[in-house]
Image (cartoon, grey):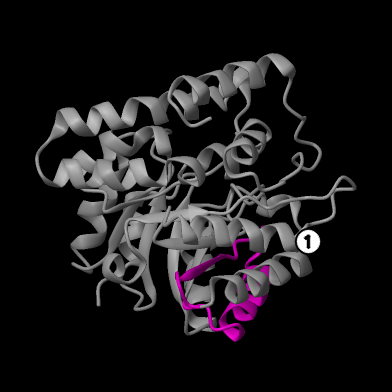
Amino acid sequence: MTFVEKYGKILLPLITPYKENEDVDYDRYAELIEYVVTKDLCDSLIVTGTTGEASLLTFDERVKLMETAVKAAAGRKPVIAGTGCASTKETVMLTKKAEELGIELCLIVCPFYNKPTQEGLYLHYKAIAESVKVDIMLYNIPIFVGVNLEAETVGRLAAIPNIVAVKDEAGVNPTQVTDFILAARAVDPDFAVYNGDDVMLLPTIVQGAQGLVSGGSHIFGHEVRAIFEAFEKGDNEKAKELFVPMYRFCKSTGQNGRILPNSILRPAIEAVTGVKLGNARLPLAPPTEDEMKVTLGILREIGKL
């Protein structure tokens, strides 16, 4: 079974709900999972990815969210664990916890803050892969971690049997998906390459990206699926027509220089789903009234509210 056959084209990184005191609300998390699974908004669920604010969660919170997701999904959708940490040692520990829970794929972001060399990145992922039996999806997002995972390094890592895929934050380098495909497929023809940026969906499909890691699919999962289907049928006009409303929404969540869209994305998802998510944890500032007026206005205009 190929990666796409097992995990599908739409991997949804779940928002982590908080109570008013910023404690994780695990009951609401289970409720959100029930919503996206019942509505069939995705093919797989990602726990504690960037959209799930992994960097703002403790180790134990991340493990408990994994446990909650496995129980709530109840085998209806695959659960993928985001287990990347700043150090190799902690990443290995968290990945082993995911493995103990029966999770078969871990999405592992490049180690942040330290800005390792390409050799450091290679040794990091190699050490993790050799410490576990789970499959690993590399996660490149230089806008947050401060270092880019180069195509040559992805090619080297593709030779490791349980490193099977990569997610690229394609908005930073729009053609790197092609570079990853060329480098990795030369080593492993089945290596999967996914785009991790909703607004880059159409440009990366054209390059051969097989799927999307999509926070916007909390709201636009059906549209994302329809875009893939339209493109595969050669109906590019239909794909573009479906893409533009999602593009407008996603761009609006980055108002006023917000790099992480969560502050605006949370209340938008809450408004559409009815699941209480709360504000993002500090230091992410809550949205302003003017920001929400723009984003909710777009959702109303396109018929989501």
Place of residue 93 in the rendered image (x, y in percent of width and height, measured from the top left):
67, 76
Image point (84%, 55%), residue name: 23
Q: Quadrant of residue 238?
A: top left
Apparent side of residue 42 relative to residue 176 in the rendered image (left or right): right
Apparent side of residue 64 relative to residue 108 in the rendered image (left or right): right
Identify whether 11 is placed above or below 177: below
Q: Is residue 95 magenta?
A: yes
Q: Is residue 248 magenta?
A: no
Q: Which quarter of the rendering shows the N terminus?
A: bottom left
Q: Quadrant of residue 90?
A: bottom right
Image point (58%, 60%), residue name: 33
Image point (60%, 61%), residue name: 84
Q: Residue furthest top?
A: 290
Identify whether 233 is placed above or below 93: above
Q: Is residue 119 among what the camera can see?
A: no
Place of residue 60 in the rendered image (x, y in percent of width and height, measured from the top left):
78, 69
The magenta stretch spans which residues?
75-104
Image point (57%, 22%), residue name: 295
Apparent side of residue 66 relative to residue 142 in the rendered image (left or right): right
Label 1 Cα neighbours within 10 Å, binned few <14 / some 14-19 / many ≥20:
few
The amino acid at mark 1 is Thr
Front-lying residue, 14 or 63:
14
Identify whether 52 is placed above or below 66: above
Place of residue 58 in the rendered image (x, y in percent of width and height, measured from the top left):
78, 61
- The residue at which mark 1 appears reads as 58
Place of residue 73 in the rendered image (x, y in percent of width and height, measured from the top left):
54, 71
Q: Is residue 87 among what the camera can see?
A: yes
